Structures are given as C-alpha cells and as structure tokens.
Amino acid sequence: MATLNAKNTESNTVEKHTNTEALVSRFVPVSELPNFIKNGQTLGLIFFGKNSGQSRNFSDAPIPAIEANIKLEDDKSEYCEVIETSEKVSYRHMNGCNIGISQNYISIAITSTQMSRENFHVSTKSMYETVFSCLRQENYHNVFRIWNFIPRITELETGIERYQLFCTGRTSVYNTEFGPSKTTIYPATSCLGNLSNRSEALFFASRTNDIQVINIENSLQMPAYKYPKKYSPAPPAFARATYCKESESCGIIYISGTASIQGHESLHPDNAIEQCKIITKNLTALLNKENLEPHGIVRSISIKDINQIKVYIKKQEHFEEIERYFKEIFSKNAEIVFLYADICRTELLVEVEGIVYIR
C-alpha cells in the first residue's frame, strides 16, 4: 500500500527495542494480526480502515482494542496498530471495559454508543469516570497516553461543537481525579473524528514510580489547558508530549496530535502545505535540546528521530501533497501511515502524532 511505510517484521522491531520494560508500537495488516498477538504480550490494538468495525473477532481473549473507523487511502485495506510489552499480559473484562495488565503497565479500551445530541458531555464524563475507576481499582495511576475517536467531532449541538462538549466532560473528570492545576499534569492525547456512531477510547498507564511519567510542553504553543474559553467552555486538557522514562538512558516520548496552531490560534486555514510547515516547526521546537533537557532527556533528538508517525488528513484533495511533504521531512526508516480523519477545529486540515524511542 503506497500510504504505509512500515517495517512489519517481528525481527526488525525486537532488534531495535530490547529494553525489558519497553513498550513497542507497530502497524500490521489485519490479516497478519494473529501472528502478532499469539505471544500474549499485546497491550492494545487500534484498527484503521472503513470496515474496521468488522475486526472485533480477532481473539477469544478480551484484548483492549478500539476501532478508529477512519479511512485509509485504499478503502479495501485494514491495518492495525499493535502496542506490545516484553512482559506477559493478562486480560479481563470489567465495567464494560476490556483491560490488559502486565507487571508495569495497564491498558483500558472503552466504547460508548450513548451519543445523543443533548448529553455528549455527559456520556464522555461517564466513559472517563469508568476508566479512572478501573485504574484506581487496579492501582495504576500514571496515565501517559490516550487515543480518542468520536463521531462528528465538529458538529454543532445546542450551539456548541461536539469536541467542545467532549472537552467539558473530560475536564470535569480530570478536575476530580487530578485536581485543578496550573501545571502540565495531563497525558499525551489525540482526539479525532470517526465515521461511526460510537465514541472509542484507549488508555495506557503505568503502576510504579520505576517508570517516571513526565509531561512536556512546547514553547511555540500555549499549553492547551490554558486556551481561552472561545475554544471550549472547558479547556482541552492534554500535554504536547509525554515522556515515559524507564531508566536514565531509556524511555519513550509519546507526541500528542499536533496541528497548525501556534500560541492558541490556528494558522493558514486554507493552505494544507503551510499547515504542514507549522506542524514541522512545532515538532522541531518540541524535540529540541533546550526543551527536552529540563525533563531529563539529554540526548540530541530531531524530527528525523521520530520512529512512528500517524498523519491524519481531512480532505482527499490534499492527500498527495501532504504525503509527499512528510515523506521528505521524516526519516525514510520511520513507520508512517497516512489516514483520513476529521480534526478538532474546522479550519485545520492535517494533524500529526508520533513516537520516539530513546535507547
């Protein structure tokens, strides 16, 4: 498939990531999924493709999995992002969630179909409350990565965009769980629109202080939790990135969905390539030495060091130029997938997220 540059062999991944506590994420065709989950070390799955809703029956075990229900360029293809640990994972179903638990990590997948126009913020609040109840019960407190896929993300409901209602429900739970804060206590997060009538979320957290969770901001962008109220009655609560520090020399940087926003304002609303250039500047500022060193990351990192990338594109007419641009920007050795998805502001045309392995 032309839109996926992915080294999918198990040997490639294991060779690169050998730390005993490391998480590894990779893209695989759905048809090859049984070969990747049979070892019992899969923490979570994200299915991509228009027909990804047909992919539930991949295992007898309740592996945490969500269906992004967003399109690939080739409507006939289905891919899956597989998140694994070197630790053995046990699975259970609790409070409507599928949960994966290893010695150091937990993953929780939750789906809601209660998406009425009147109470989207209420259903979001209920989803997050359920997940945090499970986290408390299992004693895993350090949330470091969340993916959300919600239907009709910018549709107006009672005069408010659905993403704004989502933020209201989420922040309500965060204020209870974390307490109101003027510092970055929120995890790396992505929130995209999907093609279904379900809201889906996948959470990852760690148990022990041995894996330190450090949230990182970006000097070019206002912290999202400080955005003016014109964007949402409650602010979008997430960090620009989260660093899972496994040891003094090893860790993983999870980069949140990054768009053409500087300060708090969207830039170049009608120009896809100019938006890509702003994203590149934002990622460069996020990963530069001056930004990372205060967080204990002393290794020099550039945009070429991002190991895995997802590029979300709003409109088909911009696909080829965005694909061409980012294939030049990112490393040719990176796993990169290009997807169609709606984005949280109507004027934004493209969003990028990524993972950097520090070994």
Image (cartoon, grey):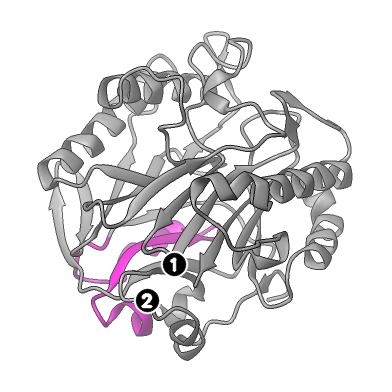
The residue positioned 57% from the left and 27% from the top of the image is: 224
Q: Nearer the viewer, residue 122 or 309?
A: 309
What span is colored magenta in the figure? 34-63
Residue 250: assigned label = 1
Q: For marks 1 and 2, give the CA distance.
A: 8 Å
Q: Residue at x 45, y 79 (%)?
A: 31
Horizontal side, residue 56 vs residue 24: left or right: left
Give the x, y percent position of residue 326: 78, 60
Q: Are marks 1 and 2 in contact (CB under 8 Å)?
A: yes
Q: Is residue 108 above or below residue 304?
A: above
Which amino acid is tagged 1?
Cys
Q: Residue at x 32, y 43 (%)?
A: 111
> For the residue carrying disc 2, how many other residues have a C-alpha within 10 Å: few (<14), some (14-19), or many (20+)?
some
Extreme residue in the bottom direction? 11
Q: Is residue 34 left or right of residue 281?
A: left
Q: Quadrant of residue 72?
A: bottom right
Give the residue displayed 46% in from the left and 41% down from the top.
215
Residue located beneath label 2 in the image: 19
Tell me if residue 6 comes above or below residue 155 in the rendering.
below
Q: Can residue 148 be seen in this snapshot? A: no
